[in-house]
């Protein structure tokens, strides 16, 4: 019923049920429902997918990808943003890179844009001790109009979900919970700062004497670029000592501030951008960890036989019986899981398989003949999920050259 489904009121009832009891239906079935809701929205919005229909076109400089994308896509209406966006990438000389965007260049653009924007060096997001991303609470000190940037990034993430493009962005669980409209509490604090969580537990269990001896009050002291800032947790909090009778309130307010209050405006702007593309009720079909999986894919073993069944060939590789192709699959089967992930990332820009199997990968995973110059290394066009493989004559040479390429972490190349 999820894959075929009903229409209109039936969908609304299913969504309401699953928002309240999501785990009564398997995760993959809810993913199917999500994809169907997106497809139906594209029909309702009259979203044109063919390159023969008018669509939005932009030029962006590869070395200024975020700035150009922000300037050119921010003014686009929500309706047009759902349509196909044609992207032309300019190299460092200001010249168009080779390649025609049949959808693949946009995928490469989107992946690179998100990788750049979420880099903590940009200042919009920070990382926890576990290297998970959350909005920078001090963003106003490093960016003008920061909320416009969060709105833009919410729309971009929504576009990735709308187009079924996996992006490896490890969000902190307390942030994905906020995206689902859930408030965090002290039990969620370890995902942000395990040390603060341990300190609060120490305070909760403290039996060593008067709590007042700890000299705490209802404030938070922050160091922002060398400046000490004091924020009161309650009106007049600087004059209210933490005592045995009010320490639970203090613990609650500290956790609430760190997990909810300090990123509220940023999260709200991000959500508004996300909701411009993806209906928030669709996301509430999932829990916080499941939403992360919907965005980035599942960290599960790569099914090589599924990949092989859904691989196509081009150039001199007419089918899977070509000797080089047979050697290729022999090498892939002998790879470690980490090497398989490197191969997938090298070819598709994402190290994780599609949630519903490789039949969902668009364009299809393709192995293309790169000719008979056997001193060349394999290369890839991640925009087209295309692996360009010289016609190596034996599996050992193929293995050595392929591993050299994928382990080098080579970037984007267009033929």
Image (tube, rainbow, N blue to C red):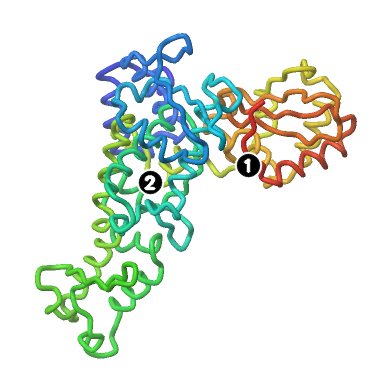
Residue 119 drawn at (x, y percent): 46, 50
Q: x and y percent of residue 357 in the render?
A: 57, 29
- Answer few, some or many: residues within 10 Å of disc 2's Cα (few below 14, many 20 plus, some between 14 and 19): many
Towards the viewer: 221 or 56 = 56
Graded by Cα atoms within 10 Å as few (under 14), some (14 to 19) or many (20 or more), the crowding at tag 1 reads few
* Alpha-carbon span between mark 2 and mark 1: 22 Å
Give the residue displayed 83% in from the left and 31% down from the top. Answer: 327
**Residue at point 29% right, 70% down?**
222
Residue 342 x, y percent position in the rendering: 66, 43
Q: Which residue is found at the position 28% from the left and 59% from the top? A: 185
Image-quadrant location for residue 189: bottom left
The residue nearer to you, when weighing 152 against 364, is 152
Q: Is residue 129 left or right of residue 357?
A: left
Name the element at disc 1: loop
Label 2–label 1 contact, CB within 8 A: no
Point out the tag, 2 or 1, that comes first from the N-terminus: 2
Residue 226 to residue 179: above or below: below
Seen at 58% across and 42% down, the residue is 300
Q: Residue furthest right?
A: 393
Query: Label 2, on which residue?
Result: 288
Quarter placement of the N terminus? top left
Residue placed under numbered mark 1 in the picture: 301
Q: Residue furthest front?
A: 93
Question: Does residue 243 appear to the left or right of 103 in the view shown?
Answer: left
């Amino acid at each position: 019923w999820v894959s075929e489904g009903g229409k209109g009121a039936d969908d609304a009832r299913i969504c309401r049920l699953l928002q309240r009891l999501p785990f009564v239906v398997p995760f993959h079935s809810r993913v199917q429902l999500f994809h169907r809701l997106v497809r139906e929205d594209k029909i309702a919005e009259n979203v044109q997918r063919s390159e023969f229909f008018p669509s939005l076109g932009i030029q962006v400089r590869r070395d200024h990808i975020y700035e150009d994308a922000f300037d050119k896509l921010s003014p686009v209406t929500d309706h047009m943003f759902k349509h196909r966006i044609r992207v032309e990438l300019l190299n460092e000389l200001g010249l168009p890179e080779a390649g025609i965007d049949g959808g693949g260049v946009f995928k490469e653009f989107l992946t690179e844009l998100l990788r750049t924007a979420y880099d903590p060096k940009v200042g919009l997001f920070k990382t926890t001790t576990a290297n998970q991303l959350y909005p920078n609470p001090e963003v106003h000190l490093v960016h003008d109009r920061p909320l416009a940037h969060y709105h833009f990034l919410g729309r971009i993430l929504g576009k990735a979900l709308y187009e079924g493009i996996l992006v490896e962005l490890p969000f902190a669980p307390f942030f994905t919970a906020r995206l689902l409209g859930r408030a965090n509490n002290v039990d969620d604090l370890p995902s942000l700062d395990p040390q603060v969580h341990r300190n609060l537990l120490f305070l909760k269990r403290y039996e060593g004497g008067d709590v007042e001896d700890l000299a705490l009050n209802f404030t938070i002291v922050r160091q922002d670029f060398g400046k000490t800032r004091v924020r009161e947790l309650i009106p007049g909090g600087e004059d209210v000592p933490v005592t045995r009778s009010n320490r639970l309130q203090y613990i609650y307010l500290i956790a609430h501030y760190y997990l909810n209050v300090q990123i509220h405006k940023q999260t709200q702007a991000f959500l508004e951008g996300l909701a411009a593309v993806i209906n928030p009720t669709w996301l509430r079909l999932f829990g916080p960890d499941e939403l992360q999986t919907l965005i980035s894919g599942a960290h599960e073993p790569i099914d090589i036989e599924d990949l092989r069944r859904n691989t196509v060939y081009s150039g001199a590789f007419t089918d899977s019986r070509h000797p080089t192709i047979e050697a290729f699959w022999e090498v892939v089967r002998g790879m470690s899981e980490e090497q398989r992930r490197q191969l997938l990332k090298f070819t598709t820009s994402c190290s994780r398989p599609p949630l519903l199997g490789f039949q969902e990968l668009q364009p299809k995973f393709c192995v293309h003949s790169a000719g008979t110059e056997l001193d060349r290394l394999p290369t890839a066009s991640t925009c087209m999920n295309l692996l360009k493989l010289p016609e190596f004559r034996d599996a050992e040479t193929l293995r050595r050259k392929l591993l050299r390429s994928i382990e080098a972490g080579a970037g984007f190349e267009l033929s």
